[in-house]
Image (cartoon, rainbow, N blue to C red):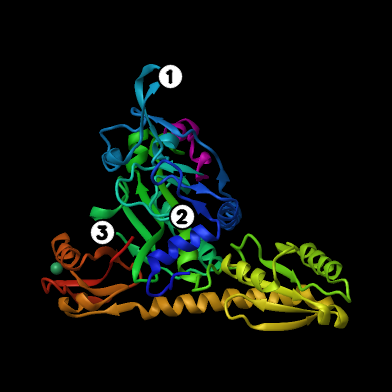
Amino acid sequence: MENKKSNFSEWYNEVIEISGLSDKRYPIKGMNVWMPYGLKAMQNIDRTIRESVDSRNFQEVQFPVLITRDQLSVEFEHVKGFEKEVFWVTRGGMEPLEVEMALRPTSEAAMYGMFSLWVRSHADLPLRLYQIVNVYRYETKHTRSFIRIREIHFFEAHTAHDSYEDSERQMRQYMDIWGEISSRLCLPFEVHQRPDWDKFPGAKYTLAFDTLLPGGRSLQIGTIHQYGTNFSKTYDIKYLKDDGGHEYANQTTFGLSERLLAAVIGIHGDDHGLIFPPDVAPTQVVIVPIPSKKVDVDSFAKEVQQKLLSQGFRCTTDDRENYTPGFKYNDWEMRGVPMRIEIGEREVTSGTAVLVSRHDRKKTKAPIEDVAAWTSTILQGIKDALTDKANKYFRENMHHICNLDDLAKTEGFVIAGWCGERECAEKIEERYEFGTLGISPDDSEEKSCIVCGKPGRNGTFSRSY
Ligand code: ZN
C-alpha cells in the first residue's frame, strides 16, 4: 500500500478501491458506485446524523429530484449561483419538455413552494424538516471519490421560524448537533464564517466546518446557513400573526455529505489501511478462529460472537477456509475493523479470548464471561485514541503568521491578520494558491491586516479540496 504521509492522494484512492468502499469505473465521470462495505459505513454515519436530529424533533421527508425552471425562479441570486452547475432535463421521451427541469443541486427550490402552502399561522412554526437524498452538480473540475463528485449523498435540514431570534437559536442548536456527530466520528474541525463572496447563494451568512486532511489541505465537511427572510420573500412563506398581520418566516439550513466519510478515511487511516471509529465501522469486531485439531475452536468462537451480538455489537466471525489467520488479520486491518478477537487452542482451554485493537495492535486477554464488557472498554479507548491523534495533527498544523512570505513554506491552516476586504484576501490567495476560509466567530482579537495594515481580525486561509 502507498505511504499515507508522503503520498496521501494515491493512498486515498488505493484504500478506497482495495477495501471495497466504492468503484469509480462507472461510465459517468464523478458518479461512483457505492459498494456494500462503503454503503454500510455511510449508513452508519447517516444513523448518527438521524439520531441527533430526530432527538430534537426534526421530521424526515423526501422531496422529488426534479425541479422546474420556474421553481428555481431564475431571477433569484440563489439560482444565479447554481445555474452553471445544474444538470438540466430537456426532453420527456422524444418530446422536448415545455418547461425545462433541473436535477436538484440542493432542495430550497423544491421545498419552499410547499412550505408556503404548509405554513399558515405561527402555530405551524417552527417547522423543522430534513432529508437524506442524492443531489446533482455538473462538476467540471477533477473529481475525487467522496470529495468532489457529481452525484452527492446529501443530508439537508431546512427550518422556518416566527422570528429572527428563533432562527438564531436554531443556528446555535446546529452547533450542538454538529458537536455530537463530529465527536462520534472523531473528527476535529474549526468553524469559519465564510466571506460574503463565498457564502451560500441567497444566505445572510454561512458558517462552515473545516477539517484538515493529511497533506495539509482543508476539507469543508459541513455548513449551516442563516437565510433570514431572503428565501421566504422569494417563495412567499408567510404566517398570520396574533394581531392579524402577515410576516415572512426566517429560515435556516444545515448540510452534510459523504465528505464525512472522506474525512474519516483520510484522517484516521494508516499505512495498513482504513481505521474506522466504532460508530462508523460496518463491522466493529471480527473474530478470527485459529484452527486446532484438539479442541472445537469454531463453536467457542460462535459462543463469543453470540455474546457480543446480544449486547448490540456489530460482530462477525471470519470462518473462510483456505486462508491463514495471518492473512485474515491483514485483511481486516486493511478494512479498518476497530477490534479483532483471536481464539485458538489456548483460549478455548483457558476460557479466554485475545482482544486486539486496530490502531495500536495492543492485545488484551479477557475471560470469556467478561468479553462484552472488555469490548465496550476497548472500543471506547479506540475512539478516544483516534480523537486525540486527530486533534494533535490538527493543532500542529495551525500556523499564525505575521509576514506574507511565511505563506510559501506553510501548510495546513494559516491564521493571519486580515481587514476583511476581498482585495487583500485575493493577494493572499493568488500568490500561494490559498483559499479564504473566513473568520472564526469566537475569535474577536484585533489584528492588523497582513496585506494592507488596516485594522482587522484573524482570518484563516488554506489550500483546500
Ligand atoms: Zn487588508
Residue 447, quarter of the rendered image? bottom left
Which residue corresponds to mark 1? 93
- Dot 3 or dot 2, earlier in sequence: 2
In the figure, 19 relative to 328: above or below? above
Percent coordinates x, y for residue 92 in the rendering: 41, 20
Of circles 1 and 3, which is in front?
1
Q: Nearer the viewer, residue 2 or 95?
A: 2
Question: From this viewpoint, is residue 97 visible?
Answer: yes
Query: Badge 1 local density, few (<14 within 10 Å), some, or many (20+)?
Result: few
Report the amino acid beneath label 3.
Pro
* Whether residue 246 is situated above or below residue 287 in the rendered picture: above
Magenta span? 113-132
Residue 34's place in the image compared with 2, above or below, is above
| Residue type, label 1 | Gly
Question: Few, some or many C-alpha atoms within 10 Å of disc 2 (few <14, some 14-19, many ≥20)?
Answer: many
Q: Nearer the viewer, residue 285 or 123?
A: 285
Q: Which residue is mark 2?
A: 170
